[in-house]
Every structure is written in structure tokens, then in C-alpha cells.
Amino acid sequence: MKLSSATFLALFAALSTAESCSYKSDDYGTLKGTCMKPSTCNTLGGYLKKDLCSGGSDNVCCIQKSCKAPKSITGFCTTIKNCDSIGFAKRVKNKCPGGDDVQCCYYDL
């Protein structure tokens, strides 16, 4: 998934003025996120937590968190569906907060 410079700048500008949110995880403490459209969060490789932002179902808390994959590779926490859509990415369980559908997605090229 490649982002053009214009797309990246537009996303950055939108995020800098967006509503903040937080999610309390028993294992990982309080995680900070940003309220945004679900599709934008998916593009950024985050994962969604519903009912933490104003604005209804089209405005969700997007959590972006890094994780440690095998061989000390740094990955990112996202849903299985998002990780699998990348094509050549791999994933590992029990490295990320969230439900069973949130895993550590990484590249081992």
C-alpha cells in the first residue's frame, strides 16, 4: 500500500486537527488514538475502537501501535484483514491490545 506525497500531507493535516481518544487495555495500559473515518484508519494501518468518539459510526478511535515480531522486527498492530490485504506481510498473535482480530503485522523480506 503506497501513499502519494499529496495523500500523506492531506492525511497529516486532517490528523493534526482531529479529536483525540484513548482506550484502556488491561495488558498495555492507556493507548492514545485519533478519531477519524474507519477507511482512513485502515489506510494508515491502525485498528478501530468503536464508541470512543463523537460523530457516530463514521468517526472511530484509530489506535496506531508498534509491536515486536519474531527476530526483533518492528511491526504494527492492525486487523487480520488489513494485514492480509498487504499481500506479503506476515502476522503474529498476542503482541497487540484489542480483540483476537488485532495482530502484529510485519514484513520479513
Image: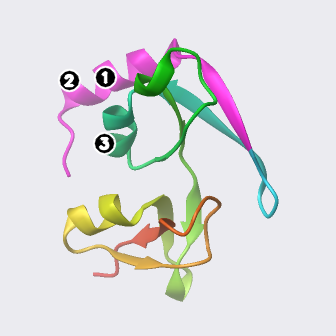
Does residue 24 appear left or right of residue 13 in this picture? right
> Disc 1 designates what residue?
9
Q: Quadrant of the C terminus?
A: bottom left
Find the distance from the CA under tag 3 to the CA under tag 2.
Answer: 14 Å
Find the distance from the CA under tag 1 to the CA under tag 2.
Answer: 5 Å
Q: Residue at x 31, y 36 (%)?
A: 39
Q: Please report contact status of discs 3 and 2: CB closer than 8 Å, yes or no.
A: no
Does residue 101 appear left or right of residue 65 in this picture? left
Residue type beneath disc 2: Ala
Residue type beneath disc 1: Leu
Question: Mark 2 falls on what kind of element?
Answer: helix
Residue type beneath disc 3: Thr
Find the distance from the CA under tag 1 to the CA under tag 3.
Answer: 14 Å
Question: Mark 1 falls on what kind of element?
Answer: helix
Q: Residues within 10 Å of mark 1 (few under 14, many from 20)?
A: few
Q: Residue at x 32, y 58 (%)?
A: 82
Q: Which mark is residue 99?
A: none
Q: Please report contact status of discs 1 and 2: CB closer than 8 Å, yes or no.
A: yes
Q: Which mark is residue 6?
A: 2
Q: Residue at x 32, y 62 (%)?
A: 81
